[in-house]
Amino acid sequence: GQQLNQSPQSMFIQEGEDVSMNCTSSSIFNTWLWYKQDPGEGPVLLIALYKAGELTSNGRLTAQFGITRKDSFLNISASIPSDVGIYFCAGRNRGSYIPTFGRGTSLIVHP
Amino acid sequence: SQTIHQWPATLVQPVGSPLSLECTVEGTSNPNLYWYRQAAGRGLQLLFYSVGIGQISSEVPQNLSASRPQDRQFILSSKKLLLSDSGFYLCAWSESGDGYTFGSGTRLTVV
């Protein structure tokens, strides 16, 4: 099956720094999704991407659908303590009911 | 608007006891429904998904089973819990796979 490699696994940063994380796949996806999970909660959808090359922002978050369709990137600018959590990428192909999730990037922001 | 309800939030059960976790969705019809398990705060493992009443697909052989007795109700069950069944269980729904909305999760501890 399709494999998603999400990196980095963990990030420890200072408040105010920018953050970058990415996901790469062994094959193409038609949809990329980025989620954030707060401790003890279910993941919440941050950004959905539907076209190769698409760049979408949600506040301080920006995500891009890679041109090759095999990767996606999430950037967080000027991090704040409430950005702490686990960020998941997910890819899905048209006609499939099942998304493939990355293993997550754990983000810790030091005030 | 659509909402997803999952309960209970936490559960402590002895080994060998039965399990029933319930998930309901409101504000939509014929959703795709999913049960995930998350161990140690990382990685989402798909357990079951359903595209309609009575239609259940199992992704991983488990000590668990799922049922969908009504269109917007998804139940995760076990006849006899094992220690290894401990984890964070998440229900999710989607329409056409454009995004997956998760419930708030159930923390299950088997003792």
Image (cartoon, coloured by chain):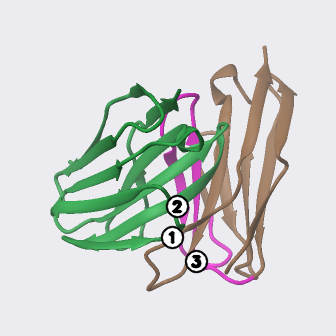
Q: Label 1: few (<14), some or many (≥20) within 10 Å? A: few
Question: Subunit of mark 1?
Answer: B
State the residue in front, A6 or B15. B15
Tell me whether marks 2 and 3 sit on the same chain: no
Q: Label 3: few (<14), some or many (≥20) within 10 Å? A: some
State the residue in front, A27 or A73. A27
Residue identified by numbered label 3: A51
Q: Is residue A14 above or below residue B16?
A: above
- The residue at the point 34 percent across, 41 percent down is B18
Give the amino acid type for the residue marked by disc 2 in the picture. Leu
Q: Is residue B85 above or below residue A40?
A: below
* Cα–Cα gap, marks 2 and 3: 26 Å
Residue stretch rendered in magenta on the structure: A27-55
Q: Which chain is green?
A: B
Q: Is residue A91 above or below residue B36?
A: below
- The residue at the point 68 percent across, 83 percent down is A28
* Cα–Cα gap, marks 1 and 2: 6 Å
Residue identified by numbered label 2: B46
Q: With B3 as the anchor, is A94 left or right in this view?
A: right
Visible residue check, residue A58: no
Tell me whether marks 1 and 3 sit on the same chain: no
Question: Subunit of mark 3?
Answer: A
Q: Tell us which disc is closer to us: 2 or 3.
A: 2
Q: Which mark is residue B39?
A: none
Give the amino acid type for the residue marked by disc 1 in the picture. Glu
Judged from the image, the secondary structure of the residue bearing numbered disc 1 is loop
Q: Tell us which disc is closer to us: 1 or 3.
A: 1
Question: Subunit of mark 2?
Answer: B
Q: With A87 as the anchor, is A92 left or right in this view?
A: left
Q: Which chain is brown?
A: A
Find residue B109 and report its horizontal and vertical position in percent.
51, 29
Residue identified by numbered label 1: B59
